[in-house]
Amino acid sequence: MMKDIVAALEKKRESARLGGGQKRIDSQHAKGKLTARERIALLLDEGSFEEWDMFVEHRSHDFGMQENRIPGDGVVTGWGTINGRVVYVFSKDFTVFGGSLSRAHAEKIVKVQQAAVRNGAPVIGLFDAGGARIQEGVEALGGYADIFLENVLSSGVIPQISVIMGPCAGGDVYSPAMTDFIFMVKDTSYMYVTGPDVVKTVTNEIVSHEDLGGARVHAAKSGVADGAFENDIEALAQMRRLVGFLPLSNREKPPSVPTFDDPERAEPSLDTLVPANPNTPYDMKELIQKVADEGDFFEIGKDFGKNILTGFGRMEGTTVGFVANQPMSLAGVLDIDSSRKAARFVRFCDCFNIPIVTFVDVPGFMPGTKQEYGGLIKHGAKLLFAYAEATVPKVTVITRKAYGGAYDVMSSKHLRGDVNFAWPTAEIAVMGAKGAVEIIFRADIGDSEKIAARTKEYQDAFANPYVAASRGFIDDVIMPHNTRKRIVRALRTLKTKKLENPAKKHDNIPL
Amino acid sequence: MFSKILIANRGEIACRVIKTARRMGVKTVVVYSDADAGSMAVDMADEAIHIGGSPAAQSYLVQDKIVAAVRQSGAEAVHPGFGFLSENAGFAKRLQDEKIVFIGPNPHAIEAMGDKITSKKFAAAAGVNTVPGHMGLIADAKEAVKIADSIGYPVMIKASAGGGGKGLRIAWNSPEAKEGFEGARAEAISSFGDDRIFIEKFVDQPRHIEIQVLGDKHGNIIYLNERECSIQRRNQKVFEEAPSPFLTPETRKAMGEQAVALSKAVQYDSAGTVEFIVDGNRNFYFLEMNTRLQVEHPVTELITGYDLVEQMLRVAAGEKLAIKQKDVGIKGWALESRIYAEDPYRGFLPSIGRLKRMKFPAEGKLDEGTVRIDTGVREGDEISMFYDPMIAKLITHGKDRAAAIATHTKALERLEIRGIQDNSPFLAAVLEQKRFQSGDITTGYIKEEFPNGFSGAEASPEVEKVIVAAATYANVLMRTRMAGISGRIEPARPQRKDWVALIARKQIPVNIKYQQGEAEIEFVGGKMHAISTNWLPGMGMMELVFDNQTYALSIATAEEGFVIRRLGVEAHVKVCTPFQADLHSRLPEKQKPDTSKLIMSPMPGLVVSVAVKVGQEVKSGEAVCVVEAMKMQNIIRAEADGVVKTVSANAGASVAADEILVELV
């Protein structure tokens, strides 16, 4: 008797696991995509996935839908572990109704979202779906809104990660949009509010899926995506890596892993990182890679706003967030894209107790009508705001230029930087010597000899870290080769830092 | 002996001279340009004097500045190194006039040997074999053809002032002789401002073998045996060895004696090199004499035991040569390769920039031989566009040629250079070739063995196993470590033993019994192998003992798996669970994007000019822009027909390798 019951259950499970059937699974593979369950299996520790709501079916009776029910209803949900740590997942099943969202489908997602926020564990959503289930009409729209609300309520409480692994359009884009990170898979995923057909009808513009919302577009142009990967397998391997850097919720300290790296490791080659010519670029990523444990750096937004670097690394085994101006791109200037990108990253770190290490080489804000018309004032202010409000440990190293307002912005002492170092090559000033002299000594502009002498005078007086250090804006001038050791020691003192902002409902960051 | 000398050079050779001077108790002064302000030579020398801008024409080639530096520092003598002013008779004369000792031969000897035509006349007069050819000036192409016809083909048409392959043509018949003469002359005028051309017999199966000579101011001259430098790429030496695997004692003696005779004819009084071309029947002909220390001098030092820089200093100071010809022997075998900042996978284009990581094997004993590294850069230094892009010379010594090669291979294996591309994969591939190992080499070797350039070496089955073992070990170690993360809800389970290594689409299933530091790995259907290593995450090199054989591998993490390189072999290995490997096999292979419509800069450089505008029609092969790198102008051409969609290149802007310059539709 019992045997039959077990057999019946097993049969039910089996049919659920097949989703939309073998034919659709094969078609999914042929397109270069994995199935919802395969993806979960790769993302989580082997055998750790516990599926919920496998037997949920939609409740629609319109347009013949009552004849067509598939257990699971287009999304696989549940929880499992990544390196033994709990994460909640939902994975859209394109083989079932194209992954479209019904009321029941939405309820499944909301269930894991609520559990995650209650229990303090991240939610990872894998997207590959065709939007709302039109047959359900407003029921589906309500379902979307329920998910959005949970996204918002969870924001800042648990990390939320979205991986776009197929189509993601219309209402489907707004849930990922409100999560902390969006990653995409090149060539097989796209994301947009309205697709090429609608675009053509409304604006007469002819554009392909890939050019409208492909991974490259969002990772490099719009900045909607934080990274793009070659295929599903690589993307999921990298998600496992990312989760290894993140605390499971804002109730936790960042995780630590055993490290093989010497905290006092000196890097003599850093002494020559900054070139002799102040206008010659150098690769700031080298500094991050030589300072971080084992050179391991998980970059966020690698192809967007390249003039600033953001991402996670570890110091003595514990996660830190790195933010660094990148002189290789636009001389490391702050513009709209880089300010937005870094501001969001700083706020993420602050939400989740991740100390921020900032490397500064910034010539200022980007001039020009394009920037001003685009609202540089408000976008630039986002980064300023983010650094100022952040209460997590903040360690700053100025490697070269720290000019003007951008100096203030980049985790300066004035914005409650905890430990602010400068390399001997640092130039902390209102602007570069040339520009300054042309303003102060406007009368002498015709006389190139005088200007040269004044420039040198200004250079000698201000193009160094000592003026700032004499005011206490810099705590110490350090040798580049000791940077890792000095940051490690600073972070040790900040492990028990306590700082709170005034009580408020929430702040009003210039969005 | 001098108490202080000035080195009118930079980089590796400046450091090399300082080492010997320091050992001899002689103080050193180096001069430096803007680009070399923080260089290793500047740090090593007792004094350093800035002499001007980065281009050599503003610094290392300016005699006034060098002389002023000598005066300022109070140095008694100048070592010119090689290149720059080392073979400039005017400079040697100037120093003589200013009562400064030139650590090199007398100006007369430099002058006599400095011109290819004059030097041949001297050689012929001294009874040295010369290549049949025409020594006089050639008026026009018609005369050139007549001369070529009379010498008999093939002939070589060469600019008198030429060097480094510039202004050189080979002609196999009359029309080619005409064309070759015109081409060589045009290049001679543009490169050297000197249109003198000579024509000579082209030697078949040629080998480049040169004799090291050493003379003093008392009329003593000896030869320190030969060096074979036949492995050349576009007439630039790649490998140099001593002795030559080709010479008999009789030929060696004959060549040595002729070299000495020529040196005597010009009262040669320093270290110098007489270059010969040797044909398949061991006939040898005089090519030219280099009146300076050669780049490849270390191989001679290692087989003879003499420090050539020390000898140069001693004879320059007026000492008599203490070495007698009969003392000069050959001890073992020495092999040198030049590690260059160039990309062998992209036609050896220069790959200059910052040495983000640079680690060499330790000098001294390695395997059965010894290693010597001559370099002028350290990790974090820059290989600059202003000078020769050599990173280092790797020299190994062993009891015989096989031992020198084996140690050389081991040393190349342990070379770690990151940030720029270097030619070591190519060097290693040459060393692995049976033909090289057999000593059957000619100056055409590289052209014959790599007719289509270099695209990496194939992994042997054994090396593939080693690579798979390394990746599997690294994978399990990293997974084991991540399992130790804080915040687990349940204890970690032991790592699985069965993995599938993927190289491209090839699946290699293995079982590993792992513990940190050592493991046993079984290739399914094959044997069990014991491995051990002290590699840890973050290290760029993994020394792996595989079945008691030690291998060194360069290892880097990729988005999925590892990129592992060893010598010329490179493999991207993904270490998968069987499930993951199965999924990989289900996904179709991605088509490589069509980049023929993207015109990208093949190397970092400066955009000199852009020849196309948006909307313009472009044919395949048409020049679209010019990028300058290493002072060479490279014409970038379209690879496909199309219409220009975007132009991203701007004249005057610097571009990175692979940066898109122009996009076509």
Image (cartoon, rainbow, N blue to C red):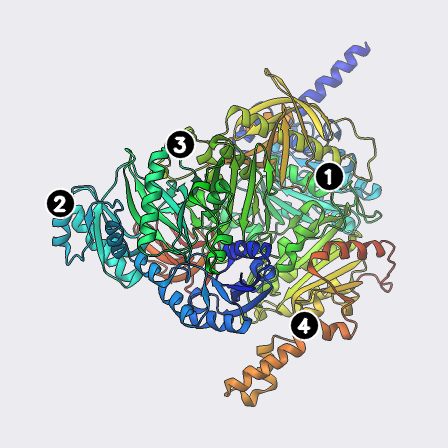
Whole-angstrom CA distance, mark 1 to mark 4, is 55 Å
SS type, badge 1? helix
Please name which of the two marks, 1 or 4, marks the residue nearer to the observer: 4
SS type, badge 4? loop
For residue B551, side relative to residue B172 (left or right)? right
For residue A394, side relative to residue B125 (left or right)? right
Whole-angstrom CA distance, mark 2 to mark 4, is 71 Å
- Identify residue for label 4: A464
- Identify residue for label 3: B439
Whole-angstrom CA distance, mark 3 to mark 4, is 59 Å
Q: Are marks 3 and 4 in contact (CB under 8 Å)?
A: no
Whole-angstrom CA distance, mark 3 to mark 2, is 34 Å
- Identify residue for label 2: B149
Observer-nearest of A417 and A461: A461
In this view of the protein, can residue B595 be seen by the observer?
no
The chain letter for the residue carrying disc 2 is B
